[in-house]
């Protein structure tokens, strides 16, 4: 299958940039504040600050808006009570937006949480009767939040006393969880919406990729490892002009999106988590760089040769060659630089080198290589979406933002093996991990992500 990428489908999908010549001293993260991503060494001890996935897409039912979403707390077992899952009250959760290509946030949306716990010494229960609304007296524990919009000119409180949708305890406790979800969606000034609460884990894949890439012979595939688990979600639906450069999404449709968590330490808040495109830290960064990468802001990426070198000469391509005999494409991998660090800038044909042949975001200022999830907000919503996104002929899909249907594992394996460079899918990886969709369907209205489950994972 040929990969067809042209200016109309990908205009502004990314922004060209040149690697800064200056060197940057590799940061050494404090072990007490290291990132909690499970793909990094120091992650498993603090799951509330573990950023699992970031999504960015044009809202299908409100195409004048964009939906941005970040998930946290991996592997939430639905029956994991009586102390169910919650956001960290000692942390700041952020969704950040770069609209001018300098890899720094022009806008930060920041959540802070506080607990409302009425259990005291009288009960161990999360609720002591059916919960039919977020204000139900039977709900004994809940979280509230403040949502703030931060720009260079100052900050604005968007939500001062929002309520987090609770964990889905079960049918007896929460007979109509959909109502609780709906009540947790808050309207914002200017026509936007916000949401915080538990959701289904919508990332689908077979995690046996770590067993020598699916058993060394592609025999360990077809099992959705994350089926049945939940996560905690922060979501925004915003008018496109609100997040675009100069407030003009028609002339400046490109934004870069990423999410971070800042945790309070003895010397103030420290960034302990960072996520944008899926699987970058997991499958691109080596073990010794993972915690450092999670502590960086994107504008620092270009100054660290180790970060860029892992993209231009990826380990995964060499593993595919040694294990499966799939010849690794020639290096340096400038096709991957476009996908992960600069955005795709080629007019016609497959993604190849020559990053500076054109500058698609002409209103942008400084352009800098950086790992962000880039979205062209002017790309129309696909009438016939393809799970392989751009390489499947669907310009709205990953790596042009990310939707819930995008099969980011199969896409990533294909592009690392050379699909974007050659212009054709790699036949040997055509089946991928054989997990092609989430087990639950995406909703039709914000926040779109499916409701959380309440059945134990070992019963699925």
Image (cartoon, grey):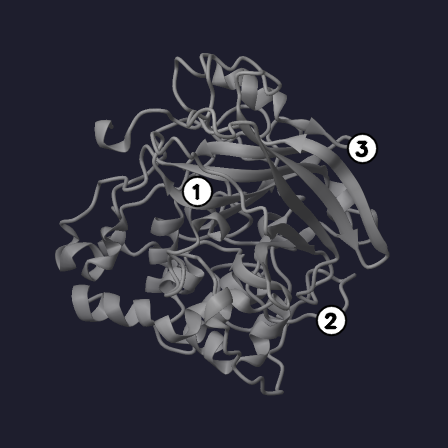
Whether residue 342 appears in this view of the structure is yes
Distance in Å between CA atoms under marks 3 and 2? 31 Å
Residue identifier under label 2: 366
Q: In percent of the image, x 48 and y 67: which residue is there?
A: 32
Residue 330 in the image, given as x and y percentages of width and height: 36, 76
Secondary structure under tag 3 reads loop
Q: Residues within 10 Å of mark 3 (few under 14, many from 20)?
A: few
- Residue 77, located in which quarter of the rendered image? top left
Q: Residues within 10 Å of mark 2 (few under 14, many from 20)?
A: few
Q: In percent of the image, x 45 and y 78: which residue is there?
A: 309
Distance in Å between CA atoms under marks 3 and 1? 31 Å
Q: Nearer the viewer, mark 3 or mark 1?
A: 3
Q: Nearer the viewer, residue 241 or 79?
A: 79
Q: Residues within 10 Å of mark 1 (few under 14, many from 20)?
A: many
Left/right of residue 209 with respect to residue 310 in the rendered view: left
Q: In the current view of this chain or complex, which residue is farthest to the front?
A: 121
Residue identifier under label 3: 189
Point out the tag, 3 or 1, that comes first from the N-terminus: 3
- Residue 117, located in which quarter of the rendered image? top right
Q: In percent of the image, x 59 and y 31: which residue is there?
A: 164
Residue 337 in the image, given as x and y percentages of width and height: 50, 69
Whether residue 314 appears in this view of the structure is no
Q: Nearer the viewer, residue 257 or 393?
A: 257
Residue 365 in the image, given as x and y percentages of width and height: 77, 68
Point out the tag, 2 or 1, that comes first from the N-terminus: 2
Secondary structure under tag 1 reads loop
Q: In percent of the image, x 31 and y 68: which residue is there?
A: 317
């Amino acid at each position: 299958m040929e990969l067809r990428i042209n200016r109309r489908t990908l205009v502004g999908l990314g922004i060209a940039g040149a690697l800064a010549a200056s060197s940057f001293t590799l940061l050494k993260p404090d072990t007490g504040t290291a990132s909690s991503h499970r793909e990094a060494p120091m992650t498993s001890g603090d799951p509330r600050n573990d950023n699992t996935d970031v999504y960015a897409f044009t809202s299908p039912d409100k195409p004048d808006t964009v939906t941005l979403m970040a998930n946290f707390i991996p592997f939430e077992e639905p029956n994991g009570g009586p102390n169910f899952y919650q956001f960290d009250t000692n942390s700041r959760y952020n969704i950040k937006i770069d609209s001018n290509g300098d890899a720094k946030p022009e806008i930060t949306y920041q959540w802070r949480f506080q607990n409302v716990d009425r259990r005291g010494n009288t009960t161990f229960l999360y609720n002591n009767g059916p919960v039919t609304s977020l204000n139900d007296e039977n709900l004994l524990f809940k979280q509230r939040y403040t949502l703030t919009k931060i720009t260079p000119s100052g900050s604005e409180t968007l939500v001062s006393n929002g309520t987090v949708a609770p964990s889905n305890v079960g049918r007896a406790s929460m007979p109509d969880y959909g109502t609780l979800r709906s009540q947790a969606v808050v309207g914002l000034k200017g026509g936007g919406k916000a949401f915080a609460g538990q959701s289904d884990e919508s990332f689908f894949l077979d995690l046996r990729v770590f067993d020598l890439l699916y058993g060394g012979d592609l025999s360990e595939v077809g099992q959705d490892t994350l089926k049945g688990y939940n996560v905690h979600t922060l979501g925004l639906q915003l008018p496109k002009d609100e997040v675009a450069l100069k407030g003009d999404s028609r002339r400046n449709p490109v934004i870069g999106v990423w999410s971070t968590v800042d945790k309070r330490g003895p010397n103030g808040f420290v960034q302990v988590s960072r996520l944008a495109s899926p699987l970058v830290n997991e499958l691109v960064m080596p073990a010794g760089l993972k915690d450092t990468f999670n502590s960086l802001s994107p504008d620092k990426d270009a100054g660290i040769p180790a970060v860029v070198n892992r993209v231009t000469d990826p380990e995964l391509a060499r593993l595919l060659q040694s294990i499966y005999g799939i010849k690794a494409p020639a290096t340096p991998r400038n096709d991957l630089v476009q996908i992960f660090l600069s955005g795709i800038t080629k007019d016609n044909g497959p993604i190849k080198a020559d990053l500076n042949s054109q500058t698609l975001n002409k209103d942008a200022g400084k352009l800098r290589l950086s790992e962000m999830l880039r979205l062209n907000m002017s790309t129309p919503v696909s009438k016939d979406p393809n799970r392989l996104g751009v390489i499947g002929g669907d310009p709205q899909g990953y790596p042009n933002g990310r939707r819930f249907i995008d099969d980011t594992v199969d896409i990533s394996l294909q592009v690392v093996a050379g699909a974007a460079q050659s212009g054709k899918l790699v036949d040997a990886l055509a089946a991928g991990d054989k997990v092609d969709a989430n087990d639950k369907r995406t909703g039709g209205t914000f926040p779109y992500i499916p409701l959380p489950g309440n059945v134990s994972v070992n019963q699925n």
